[in-house]
Amino acid sequence: MTPLRIKPLRQTPEIILDAEENIFSIFGKSAPEDAQEFYNSVLFWFQDYYKNPNTETVFEIKFVYYNTSSSKMILNIFNFLATQYEKGHSIKIKWHYPEDDEDLLEAGQEYAEIAEIPFEFIPY
């Protein structure tokens, strides 16, 4: 499967989705002009990936900031992953957050509650 690699820009995060290397990550600032267009490639990649996924998928997320429209798209991705988790696939989200940023921690906790998939919260 072809990896999805998006280099970070001023308003968009770095994204690496590589099944062969077992790397699934989004790191950085997320405030794209069109979050739906930006994150649809991630959602479509995961849809294709789950035709033949790895034994375990650990998705690492480390936002320094994300806007409301990005939040909605991230939720869409988590909801898709939740459907795969319900089908028996092993999925874990590692939610990295600055140890002094309770808002980012709470956002991750809300995602975990909504999606009902395992989350690990990692302060940095």
Image (spheres, rainbow, N blue to C red):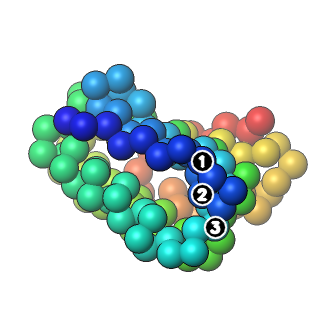
Residue at 31% x, 37% y is 3
Query: Badge 3 is on which residue?
Result: 31
Q: Residue furthest right?
A: 100
Disc 3 marks which amino acid? Ala
Q: Are marks 3 and 2 in contact (CB under 8 Å)?
A: yes
Query: In the image, is 33 to the left or to the right of 87?
Result: right
Query: CA separation, marks 3 and 2?
Result: 6 Å
Disc 2 marks which amino acid? Thr
Residue at 36% x, 43% y is 4
Disc 1 marks which amino acid? Pro
Query: Badge 2 is on which residue?
Result: 12
Viewer-closest of 18 and 61? 18
Q: Nearer the viewer, mark 1 or mark 3?
A: 1
Query: Badge 1 is on which residue?
Result: 8
Residue 95 visible in the shown view: no
Picture quadrant of residue 124? top right
What kind of element bears circle 2?
A: loop
- Residue 89: image location, x then y, percent: 24, 41
Residue at 82% x, 43% y is 99
